[in-house]
């Protein structure tokens, strides 16, 4: 096996070169492109090029599709799922560095929860309602179906939501309580109430904080049909939704770490060079919860964190969430349209609504984010309300994918490429085809005894574990000419184009341009490229 330092050097060197060469030793003739006189460009060259459109590129590259049976809910095809999963896996690896624990939470909650959190009153029009068995039975008996109100019925629905918001606490403890099935449910548009439930389920000391939860559960928001657009405006989406429960004295440090998290991720995605801007969104004029004093305190904390970040930022007056101010990270797409991706939001309200607390000495000083040396104060323990920080680094994974597709213009970096490599055969002889498939199996990690045992019905053992590499490798063993297959692989956007022929079968190698490698060396080099975000 090639040593890792050597693999890193080889990967770094080869990633800067043209991976495939038209003078490949397997080709009997060279393929060249006719050069035209630069003073008289062809007519098509004089036409202005349309900006990349992720909807067109997504279809061309087989990344996603849509259906009239679920408008606003993108369907990721196998290659699109590869990109999606790599982005999610990339974030998960960063969670180790930034101290997040991933949780899995329900998709639906009783309406009483959304009343308690304030979402029903302030966000109800953008939520989907889900009815249980009892409600369906009532509808069959002729009761009014609240889930089908339209037009003038929306006013009644809003009034009903306001009343339910006031009665939410009572409803949760009544016959529509925690154990009952009755009552209307809401399809979650965000994860914050669920994470509050998790925090409230345990006992916490000031030594335990900050507590950081992360969640990739699908979210649903009832966008109007006219606003739906590709992957940028959808009804069902995934978000790297995270929540930090911290002490008041830890707020600025946690916000600073989150902004650093954004910088690291956007640099790896090659978005930092294109530029993104930070915007502080402050208290809305109406429709917010909490006092003006609490909002001022939260906004001041965000301003200090932004100043410490050393990055330029602007203010969006009145554009904060209903529960707190926020920092939005905004990117431009190929049309110049801005999209909010990452976000950092400070929240003093949900911890109060869910009665969240932790135990700390000198609780009065602790609640103000102050320290004291008074022994009498330090000897007194009491409950303190934590501060909640909402954060998303990618934001909507679907929306970020749209921006990446257009930013890369369909030319993916190797680590994200849904077509990382393809193995082409020089001919269709049985030894060459068999060797091409063996090379692919080695590259994807399907070459060990564990897989042979698994096919025979024997479970893997510690001596022969399953070790898939996660690399995306295809094989083209068709009878077409090698030149045609190479041109098609280039057009399809493959990162590496490998070739095998009779000589490679004899030597146990695979050709990459003019160079030849063992399958194991090729695998190690590709893994280094993926791990170092090349």
Image (spheres, helix red, strand yellow):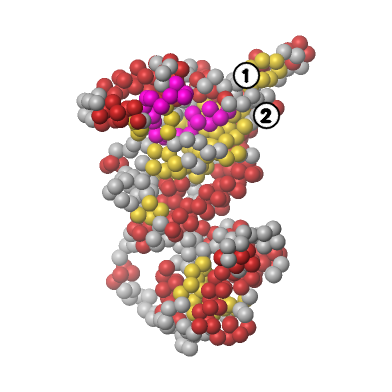
Q: Which is nearer the eye, 236 or 526?
A: 236
Quarter of the rendering occupied by the N terminus = bottom right
Q: Is residue 16 toward the left or the right of residue 79 in the image?
A: right
Please tell me whether mark 1 sits on a helix, a strand or a loop.
Answer: strand
**Residue closest to the far bottom:** 28
Q: How crowded is mark 2: few (under 14 residues within 10 Å), some or many (20 or more)?
A: few
Q: Can residue 28 be seen in this view?
A: yes
**Residue 196 located within the stretch drawn in magenta:** yes
Q: What residue appears at the point 59 percent right and 24 percent down from the top-left corner?
A: 386
Task: Write the start and end of the magenta stretch as one range.
Answer: 177-199
Q: Which is nearer the eye, 314 or 347?
A: 347
- Labels 1 and 2: the sequence-earlier one: 2
* Residue carrying label 1: 384
For residue 437, which numbered disc appears in the image? none
* Residue carrying label 2: 208
Dividing the picture into quadrants, the one containing residue 150 is top left
Q: What residue appears at the point 65 percent right and 44 percent down from the top-left corner?
A: 97
State the image coordinates of residue 181 (x, y, percent, origin top left): 41, 27
Dividing the picture into quadrants, the one containing residue 307 is top right
Give above or below for 168 relative to 140: above
Q: Is residue 23 visible?
A: no
Please tell me whether mark 2 sits on a helix, a strand or a loop.
Answer: helix
């Amino acid at each position: 096996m090639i040593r890792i330092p050597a693999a890193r050097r080889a990967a770094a060197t080869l990633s800067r070169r043209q991976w495939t060469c038209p003078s490949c030793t397997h080709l009997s003739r060279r393929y060249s492109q006719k050069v035209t006189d630069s003073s008289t460009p062809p007519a098509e060259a004089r036409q202005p090029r349309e900006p990349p459109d992720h909807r067109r590129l997504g279809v061309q590259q087989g990344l996603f599709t849509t259906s009239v049976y679920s408008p606003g809910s993108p369907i990721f095809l196998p290659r699109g799922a590869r990109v999606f999963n790599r982005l999610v896996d990339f974030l998960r690896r960063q969670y180790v560095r930034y101290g997040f624990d991933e949780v899995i939470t329900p998709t639906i909650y009783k309406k009483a929860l959304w009343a308690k959190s304030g979402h029903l009153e302030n966000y109800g029009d953008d939520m989907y309602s889900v009815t249980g068995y009892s409600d369906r039975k009532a509808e069959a008996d002729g009761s009014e179906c609240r889930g089908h109100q339209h037009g003038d019925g929306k006013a009644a629905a809003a009034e009903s939501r306001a009343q339910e918001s006031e009665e939410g606490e009572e409803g949760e403890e009544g016959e529509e309580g925690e154990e009952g099935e009755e009552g209307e449910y809401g399809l979650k548009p965000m994860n914050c109430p669920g994470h509050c439930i998790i925090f409230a389920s345990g006992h916490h000391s000031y030594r335990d904080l900050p507590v950081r939860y992360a969640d990739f559960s699908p979210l649903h928001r009832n966008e109007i049909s006219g606003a739906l657009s590709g992957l940028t405006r959808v009804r069902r989406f995934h978000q790297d939704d995270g929540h930090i429960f911290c002490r008041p004295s830890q707020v600025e440090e946690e916000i600073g770490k989150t902004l650093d998290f954004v910088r690291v991720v956007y640099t790896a995605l090659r978005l930092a060079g294109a530029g993104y801007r930070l915007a502080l969104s402050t208290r809305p004029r109406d429709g917010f919860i909490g006092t003006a004093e609490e909002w001022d305190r939260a906004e001041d904390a965000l301003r200090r964190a932004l100043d410490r970040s050393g990055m330029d930022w602007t203010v969006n007056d009145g554009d904060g969430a209903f529960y707190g101010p926020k920092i939005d990270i905004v990117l431009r797409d190929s049309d110049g349209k801005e999209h909010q991706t990452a976000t950092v939001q400070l929240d003093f309200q949900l911890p109060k609504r869910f009665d969240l607390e932790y135990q700390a000495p000198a609780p009065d000083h602790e609640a103000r984010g102050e320290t004291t040396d008074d022994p009498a104060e330090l000897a007194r323990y009491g409950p303190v309300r934590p501060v909640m920080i909402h954060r998303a680094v990618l934001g909507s994974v679907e929306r970020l994918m749209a921006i990446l597709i257009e930013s890369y213009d369909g030319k993916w970096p190797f680590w994200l490429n849904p077509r990382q490599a393809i193995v082409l055969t020089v001919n269709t002889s049985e030894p060459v085809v068999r060797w091409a498939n063996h090379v692919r199996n080695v590259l994807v990690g399907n070459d060990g005894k564990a897989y042979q045992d698994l096919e025979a019905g024997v479970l893997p053992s510690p001596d022969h574990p399953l070790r898939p590499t996660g690399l995306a490798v295809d094989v083209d063993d068709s009878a077409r000419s090698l030149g045609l297959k190479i041109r098609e692989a280039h057009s399809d956007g493959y990162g590496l184009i490998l070739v095998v022929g009779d000589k490679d079968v004899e030597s146990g190698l695979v050709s990459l341009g003019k160079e030849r490698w063992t399958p194991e060396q090729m695998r190690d080099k590709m893994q280094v490229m993926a791990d170092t975000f090349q």
